Image (cartoon, helix red, strand yellow):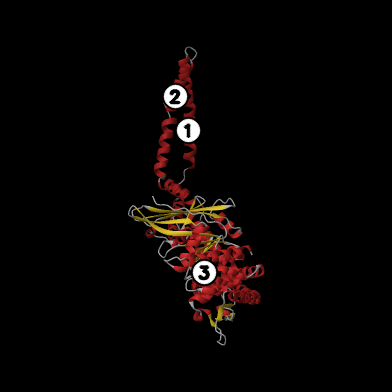
């Protein structure tokens, strides 16, 4: 089983090696651990799965703590262990501190841990709709507070607006439905249904429909028990008297005598009940018709409104509430429209406050970016953050304005949108300037730069190296680079190479000691042939970087 384990320290770490040695594999692994798109292509030929595991220092970020609590992830407030298994079937299993989560939630957690910037990461700068969010990231607590108030007010405004629009759009359908519900409510109310009523009526109908049968059965039974002559009750009474005369002679006779006595009294009681039922019998054909009519009404109501009286009554309560709400809303239509105007005015007022604060923040950000760009040898650059007001019917949850970055790198040329005029190298430096400014406030555990220095050389390369090192003073930085200037300023350097073992190619990574760093930086300076002069140059770069760090 092939495996690789790396421990990165705080500060700046560079990963160097020949092109194609596999440097980007390390960055890909970090991307996968933080929710990047994965596939079976990452699995080594012949293996059943790929297992990635990372131990991250827990950032001091309350939003991340809240997210972990929401996801049910235990947090010891010191570290997070993330594991991701990718199988050949394409199935992914992700765990954070042992709890399984989906890719989307892993990505949410990962946003607080690692910030990866590749050669094309400046594409964010090429999307003008992202510029407003970048400006807000630079803002302070006051901006965040007003922004939260605006977003809450805007959400309420849209919710009320939706109610008013739905009310206006569906007014005809709404009126028709209310008429139908009113008719149904009146019909059910007029029926005066009672829970359990149907069962009682069915029982009463069965009695009324079988009146003659019941009368004959009661009369015959009464005659058999209490008829003239030798009735059943008289015979049992005779038996009871005979047994009572011998019950003292044997316990079994006594028990038998008691049984007959009990039977006699029970039969006597039944005889009284029969007499009472016979006396109360009365055929009421009108009542039978009433019962039949009532049962037919219940059947019709069940066909329309429910399977039972209970379900009909439940439906009645539901439509009664809806009708009451409709009456309430009918009276509130004007109130809602008034409230909508008030809420819109509140949104506009908060939006104006947000605009004012953003313009102040933009002025500070402009100066900060120009300062950083000057250190990156773009000292003649002009940078401007421009606001364009949105029409009232087009305001968004982000505010009343659109924001776009404008730039010119050539004196005398007018400022134009950054997305249209900046070259790839310029965009990389603008992005690096922004990252330098934001790194102190964002609190990301690790920031990764994947060959962001491509296409630069000389003093610009040195400036980029210094800038990346400056970022590492506040965050752990990992950097893949081909520039010796960048490699020299790093606190740590890892060398990545490919090695063939048993007809299989494996990627090896080792941390370079001081002498090995001199040789590797010399290789980066001269290519395949390393001379005494390039070794001296490499050693000089490292010494200068060491003095710079100490300074």
Circle 1 is placed at which residue position? 270
| Left or right: where 335 falls relative to 220 | right
Give residue 373's position: percent from left, percent from top.
58, 75
Is label 2 in a helix, a strand or a loop?
helix
Alpha-carbon span between mark 2 and mark 3: 72 Å
| Left or right: where 491 falls relative to 253 | right
Nearer-N-terminus badge (2/3): 3
Q: Mark 1 near mark 3, Cβ–Cβ under 8 Å?
A: no
Circle 2 is placed at which residue position? 236
Q: Tell me if residue 123 comes above or below residue 7 in the rendering.
A: below
Q: How many marks?
A: 3
Alpha-carbon span between mark 1 and mark 3: 59 Å
Nearer-N-terminus badge (1/3): 3
Give residue 82's position: percent from left, percent from top.
50, 54
Nearer-N-terminus badge (1/2): 2
Alpha-carbon span between mark 1 and mark 2: 14 Å
Give residue 240's position: percent from left, percent from top.
46, 21
Q: Mark 1 near mark 2, Cβ–Cβ under 8 Å?
A: no
Which residue appears at 47% of the width and 68% of the height?
Answer: 525
Circle 1 packing at 10 Å, graded few (<14), some (14-19), many (20+), is: some
Circle 3 is placed at which residue position? 178
Which residue appears at 38% of the width and 50% of the height?
Answer: 1
Does the rendering let one see residue 362? yes
């Amino acid at each position: 089983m092939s495996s690789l384990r790396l421990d990165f320290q705080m500060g700046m770490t560079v990963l160097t090696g020949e092109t194609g040695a596999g440097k980007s594999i390390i960055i890909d692994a970090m991307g996968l651990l933080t929710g990047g798109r994965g596939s079976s292509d990452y699995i080594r030929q012949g293996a059943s799965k790929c297992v990635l595991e990372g131990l991250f220092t827990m950032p001091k970020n309350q939003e991340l703590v809240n997210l972990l609590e929401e996801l049910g992830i235990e947090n010891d407030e010191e570290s997070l262990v993330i594991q991701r298994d990718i199988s050949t079937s394409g199935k992914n299993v992700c765990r954070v501190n042992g709890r399984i989560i989906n890719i989307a939630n892993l990505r949410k957690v990962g946003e607080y841990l690692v910030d990866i910037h590749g050669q094309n990461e400046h594409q964010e700068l090429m999307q003008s709709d992202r510029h407003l969010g970048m400006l807000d990231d630079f803002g302070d607590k006051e901006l965040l507070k007003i922004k939260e108030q605006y977003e809450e007010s805007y959400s309420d405004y849209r919710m009320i607006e939706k109610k008013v629009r739905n009310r206006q759009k569906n007014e005809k359908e709404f009126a028709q439905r209310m008429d139908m519900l009113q008719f149904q409510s009146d019909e059910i109310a007029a029926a005066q249904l009672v829970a359990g009523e149907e069962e009682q009526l069915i029982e009463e109908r069965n009695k009324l429909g079988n009146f003659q049968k019941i009368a004959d059965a009661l009369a015959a039974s009464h005659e058999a028990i209490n008829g003239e002559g030798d009735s059943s009750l008289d015979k049992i009474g005779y038996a009871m008297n005979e047994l009572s005369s011998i019950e003292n002679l044997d316990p079994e006779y006594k028990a038998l005598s008691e049984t007959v006595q009990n039977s006699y009294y029970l039969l006597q009681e039944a005889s009284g009940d029969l007499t009472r039922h016979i006396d109360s019998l009365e055929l009421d054909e009108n009542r039978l018709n009433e019962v039949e009519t009532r049962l037919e009404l219940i059947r019709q109501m069940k066909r329309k409104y429910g399977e039972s009286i209970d379900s009909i009554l439940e439906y009645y309560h539901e439509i009664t509430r809806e009708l009451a709400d409709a009456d309430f809303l009918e009276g509130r239509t004007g109130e809602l429209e008034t409230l909508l105007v008030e809420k819109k005015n509140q949104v506009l007022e908060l939006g104006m406050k947000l605009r004012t604060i953003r313009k102040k923040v933009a002025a500070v950000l402009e100066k900060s970016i120009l300062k950083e760009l000057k250190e990156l040898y773009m000292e003649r650059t002009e940078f401007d953050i421009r606001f364009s007001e949105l029409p009232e019917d087009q305001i968004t949850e982000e505010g009343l304005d659109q924001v776009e970055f404008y730039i010119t790198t050539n004196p005398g040329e007018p400022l134009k949108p950054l997305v249209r005029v900046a070259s790839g190298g310029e965009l990389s430096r603008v992005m690096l300037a922004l990252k330098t400014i934001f790194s102190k406030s964002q609190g990301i555990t690790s920031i990764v730069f994947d060959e962001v220095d491509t296409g630069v050389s000389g003093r610009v390369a040195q400036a980029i190296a210094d800038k990346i090192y400056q970022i590492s003073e506040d965050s752990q930085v990992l950097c893949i680079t081909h520039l010796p200037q960048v490699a020299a300023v790093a606190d740590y350097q890892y060398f990545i190479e490919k090695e063939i073992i048993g007809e299989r190619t494996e990627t090896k990574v080792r941390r370079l000691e001081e002498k090995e760093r001199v040789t590797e930086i010399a290789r980066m300076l001269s290519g395949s042939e390393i001379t005494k002069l390039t070794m001296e140059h490499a050693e000089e770069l490292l010494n200068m970087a060491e003095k710079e760090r100490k300074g």
